[in-house]
Amino acid sequence: MLVRAWTRTYGIRATISNCSNNYGPFQHVEKFIPRQITNILDGQRPKLYGKGENVRDWIHTEDHSSGVWTILTKGRIGETYLIGANGEKNNITVLRMILKMMGQPEDAFDWVKDTTAATRSTRPNCAPNWAGRRGTPTSNRVSRRRSNGTRRTARGGNRPRPRPRHVTSSRASEGMDFMDFEKDLRAVETNIPGLVVFDLPVHGDNRGWFKENWQRAKQTKLGLPDFGPVQNNISYNAKKGVTRGIHAEPWDKYISIAAGSVFGAWVDLRPGESFGQVYTTVLDPSKAIYVPRGVGNSFQALEDGTVYTYLVNAHWSLEQKKTYTFVNLADPDLHIDWPIPLEDSERSEADLHHPMLKDAKPMAPKKTLVLGSKGKLGRAIREYAESHSLENFEYHDADTFDISDTASYENIDWDLYGTIINAAAYTSVDGAETPEGRKAAWTINVRGVRNLAKIATEHRITLVHISSDYVFDGTLQFHKEDENFAPLSVYGQTKAAGDALVENVPQHYLIRSSWIIGEGRNFVTRMLDLAQSGATAEAPNDQFGRLTFTDDMAGAIFHLLNSNAPYGTYNMTGSGRVVSWFDLAQIIFAAANADNSKIIANSVEEYAKENNAALRPHNCSLDLSKIEDAGYQPADWETSLHDYLAKELNK
């Protein structure tokens, strides 16, 4: 009682523990267990009083010590803990266990009349106080052998939580009544997706208190996104009742309280099923909240001098401010019960005139920049985005955005962008073998990719980059994503170098493909022209792979983005059987009702030698299991080819 009183009154840092029956080394010989053991060792018959029905909860001293250590290192100041082992046994059971372990018959003892004739239990009665402070039963197993560790109990009645003595202003001291000291660090998800509340350990003494307000390593393990804050803002609220919001801003934020307390209300203003969801709670220095981009934020100061602080992962700018969206604090459809009636609160003129939820504009997604937009894949990506009514897309090709020129990246607020899809590349495999082509390939495929990787990393942008099977030497029948690079050509070397740069971007999808077919000139259209004109065609019969159609490729890109698939490298081609270019030429000639005998088979080596061209890998087939496991099923290339040929033949 004295310890509790001093803890509550003077802030003494103490805990209390109650334990059940101990046994172990150095215990007095007259105690029950050591007396039975010593009698047996001395050749005397143990003695048992009464009927042996006295029940005790037995705990080894080593486990008791472990429990005390757990309380010292993890317990909360002012708490009372019960330490037990769930080892309830009556005396006769314990004695028979000792006899058996010491090689004696279990009945080798004498009965002695118990003068007290009382049957009792010494197990701590934990039931009345088992529930934690918030009504949640808790227990931590801390022993190596016998103990169930410690059980935290709640303080009885409505007694206030112990708090340190303060010598600050009465207002600050009054605010301490709201604070919960010595909590475990933990994360609690809410009904709004991505909105996470954190309990923060606050350590107090007679001087005041201390806390780790944001601890990246610990909190990311608990579910806090590694959101990369770049700016710290503080809102000082002079008077109780100051109310601000509801504003949805184009960045993630981590909110905490440095002094006082607030009633906070958050409204999901992102497009989707959760639009309009509301979450409310009280924040004080022992509680913080992570608010994802697009979730409306508001608060009401509950004390004079409340200091509200938040980290954000984008710099404020006028361009960013244009993307804000709002909802009215007084909207009855939100059902927010403000502790201080809004008519008695202090609000800005702007906050008084925000729209109601039914008229609120959902937060638009961050911008997506598509590079190489005039190429085969770039056109397919644009067609997909427009056909799905996707917002905030920008399209550039080399004439408006040169990825290899650092000047292209200047004067752009990159915090407005969430995704870059890079379909820009130098793709002339044979041209890269020339002096001019070699320079161009390295400039675009390496220097350009380096620039993109730098911007994506600095601004936490997701980078989607397209790679090639030509980074491999083709000796394996199927190539997995983690196969070592072994390019045979300059083009392959530049693509491998670019891949290595992209792999260092924290948020990246590197999509490796082969034999891409889309709108414009390609192998299929060339063979079709030759077939229809009756000309002779050549195609290697020793290079094997599968076609990839750009609409299928675009679908895979957006599947990875929309499904939040794990970042990394994914192979993506059409599915189905593996064939040679010669086999493909025969299929195309047959579709055009042309003479297949006009097709001449050659080899990769012959073509390279006769045309002073790049050497190509024999096997270009990619293992598709990873992207299939991510939930995307590539189309069968033969079905896609059939549809493509039908369209071309009908032109």
Image (tube, grey):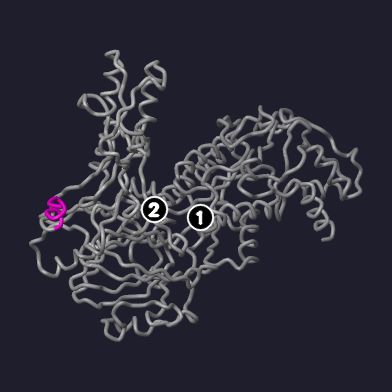
Task: Judge from the rendering whether residue 29 lies leftward or rightward of residue 368; answer left or right.
Answer: left
Q: Quadrant of residue 407?
A: bottom left
**What is the x, y in percent for residue 110?**
33, 23
Q: Quadrant of residue 496?
A: top right
Foreground residue among 435 and 158:
158
**What is the x, y in percent for residue 97?**
39, 25
What amino acid type should be assigned to the residue bearing mark 2? Leu
Foreground residue among 248 and 48:
48
Q: Give the class, few, some or many, for how many residues have Cα within 10 Å of label 1's Cα (few <14, many ≥20).
A: many
What amino acid type should be assigned to the residue bearing mark 1? Ile
**What is the x, y in percent for residue 13?**
15, 49
Residue 471 is a magenta residue = no
- Check the image and report above or below for 107 versus 290: above
Mark 1 and mark 2 residues within 8 Å of each other at the beta carbon: no
Q: Which residue is mark 1?
A: 420
Q: Secondary structure at mark 1?
A: strand
Q: Quadrant of residue 207?
A: bottom left
Numbered mark located on residue 224 in the image: 2
Nearer to us: label 1 or label 2: 2
Boundaries of the magenta span: 1-8
